[in-house]
Image (cartoon, grey):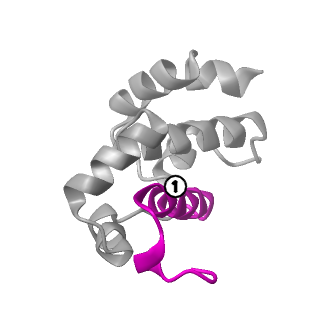
């Protein structure tokens, strides 16, 4: 963490660091272990969740889910031959396609199949 030690960063700065980590993990199709990350940041869990919600307006889990949905949306718009919705969704950790479909529609505003068709 650049020139400041993590103990000298404010809670807001630590949350912003966590958001950067979440973006990297989603971009690499890796899961974010929130407990591990919170421990690494050296914040009490309750403080992390409170500050995260204050900064983003969402819980960390919801934020990650929305990041994944937006990334899947991009992947579906630039579909590679041989890929399908189930395969792309599973690459981001979604295994229950019914729930994925509902979540995708709630976040993106359309069915994944509609995105794929365009």
> Which sits in the foreground, 43 or 39?
43
In what quadrant of the picture does the C terminus appear? Answer: top right
Judge by depth and name the residue closer to the eye, 97 or 21. Answer: 21
Up-down: is 31 above or below 61? below
The residue depicted at 29 percent of the width and 74 percent of the height is 39
- Relative to 11, say whether 111 is above or below: above
Question: On the rendered image, what quadrant is the N terminus found in?
Answer: bottom right
Q: Residue at x 58, y 60 (%)?
A: 20
The one of 24 and 115 positioned closer to us in this rendering: 24
Range of residues picked out in magenta: 1-29
Tell me what residue is drawn at x 43 percent, y 32 percent. Answer: 57
Label 1 neighbourhood size at 10 Å, few (<14), some (14-19), many (20+)?
some
Q: Nearer the viewer, residue 27 or 87?
A: 27
Where's residue 98, x and y in %?
35, 28
Q: Position of residue 116 (x, y in %)?
A: 69, 28
Secondary structure of the residue carrying numbered label 1: helix
How many numbered discs sit on the rendered protein? 1
Residue 3 lies in the magenta stretch: yes
Residue 60 visible, this orientation: no
Q: Position of residue 26 (x, y in %)?
A: 55, 56
Residue 51 against residue 34 in the figure, above or below: above
Based on the displayed image, in which of its 4 quarters is residue 103 positioned? Answer: top left
- The question of residue 15 being in magenta is answered with yes
In terms of image quadrants, where is residue 29? bottom right
**What residue do we see at 39% from left, 47% from top?**
52
- Does residue 112 appear to the left or right of 38 in the view shown? right
Q: Main secondary structure of the magenta part?
A: helix
Residue 44 image point, x, y percent: 23, 64
Displayed quadrant of residue 34: bottom left
> Would you place residue 77 above or below residue 117 in this image?
below
Q: Is residue 57 visible?
A: yes
Q: Which residue is mark 1?
A: 91
């Amino acid at each position: 963490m650049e020139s400041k030690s993590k103990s000298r960063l404010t809670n807001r700065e630590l949350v912003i660091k966590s958001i950067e980590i979440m973006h990297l993990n989603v971009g690499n199709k890796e899961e974010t272990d929130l407990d591990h990350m919170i421990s690494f940041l050296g914040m009490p869990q309750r403080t992390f969740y409170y500050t995260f919600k204050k900064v983003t307006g969402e819980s960390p889990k919801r934020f990650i889910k929305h990041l994944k949905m937006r990334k899947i949306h991009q992947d579906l718009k630039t579909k590679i031959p041989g890929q399908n919705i189930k395969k792309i969704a599973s690459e981001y950790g979604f295994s229950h396609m019914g729930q994925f479909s509902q979540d995708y529609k709630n976040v993106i505003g359309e069915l994944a199949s509609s995105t794929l068709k365009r």
